[in-house]
Amino acid sequence: MCERVIVQSIYCHQLYSMLCEATFVSNIGFLDDFCKLKCYQKHRIADGPLNWVERYPIAAGERQSPIDITTDSVVPDPDLPDNPLKWDYPKTAKVVTNTGYGWRVDVDGSGSSLSGGPLEEKYEIVQFHCHWGHDESCGSEHTVDGEAFPAELHLVHRNLKYETMEEALNYADGLSVLGVFLTVGEENQELQKIVDILHEIKYKDESVKLESPIDPLKLLPDETAYWTYPGSLTTPPLSECVIWLVLREKIQVSIEQLEAFRQMCCNGKCDEQKTLPENFRPPQPKNHRCIRSSVA
Ligand SMILES: [Zn+2]
């Protein structure tokens, strides 16, 4: 292995150990592969999500995410409203990082909890991040009756019965991800705190501490009716360990804020500049899965 590859792998290790919907480190080969896959503008060519299956066979698994939520096949589950979701989030988020495929806000979730609904245990918030598209016609990972939205926020939680993210990835109930669709409208004040510092994390692996605390609760819509189904991470290693909660009501984001996201770079500071116009995985086959709704 040449020196350059080793150095790249070390960077990837540092990045990945902080990161994403997963914190899973198996070996240098895996890390190296993952880093090659992260520039999403390659969506439709060799290294993009459509080709992940070549390196991650689970990409063709039975419970992959995202999916298209077909509302006529959704099953209302009366047990869900009887046991509402409960949030208790910390008021602070620590650090924003350019992961090479978007921004991620790490949260000190100690003492936080998400419970209720389909969740049989308590979950703790770990981080949140966003997926977006090159224009307003696409960007969300989940779609509803075939319709995509300009962006989708993911709040990632770990089941507290598992001690680490690595461990949680091995279990069907390891993580719960709360998805929130974004539509174009008014400027989102909480997201603006991130937009304001994106110029400091333009390049991959750059991080900046948040001076102005972000309250994850302020990123949720007023109405919290949701769909739920068993799924996976939407980035490698695509582990099938996620109980998805996709909120029906959307929040707003301005065109200028989306444009600021797209201007982030997926390359390191010294490499050829490549912006991140989009970073979403397309919907995967629903297969035998049932999508339940918290309302009729
Ligand atoms: Zn995500």
Image: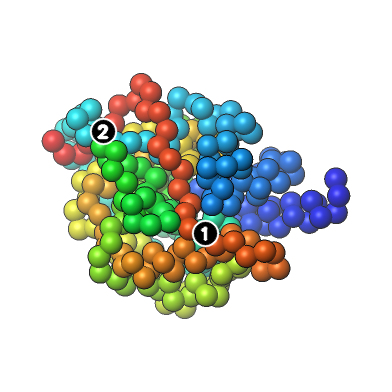
Instruction: Please tell me which residue lies in front, 122 or 33.
Output: 33
Instruction: Please tell me which residue lies in front, 101 or 171.
Output: 101
Q: Amino acid at mark 1?
A: Leu
Residue 250, by quadrant, is bottom left
Please state, as top left, top right, bottom left or bottom right, where the C terminus lies in the image. Answer: top left
The mark tally for this picture is 2
Q: CA distance from mark 1 to mark 2?
A: 29 Å
> Which residue in the protein does label 1 denote?
276
* For residue 187, side relative to residue 122 (left or right): left
Pointer 1 residue Cβ closer than 8 Å to ligand 1: no
The image shows residue 95, relative to residue 73, as above or below, that is below
Task: Determine which of the numbered discs, if any, sits on residue 70 in the image.
Answer: 2
Residue plotted at (52% across, 42% down): 44
Q: Amino acid at mark 2?
A: Thr
Mark positioned earlier in the residue sequence (1 or 2): 2
Task: Determine which of the numbered discs, if any, sits on residue 82 in the image.
Answer: none
Residue plotted at (58% across, 52% down): 39
| Residue at the outermost left position | 296
User: Are the residues tagged 1 and 2 within 8 Å (C-beta)?
Assistant: no
Position in image of residue 227 (x %, y %)? 27, 39
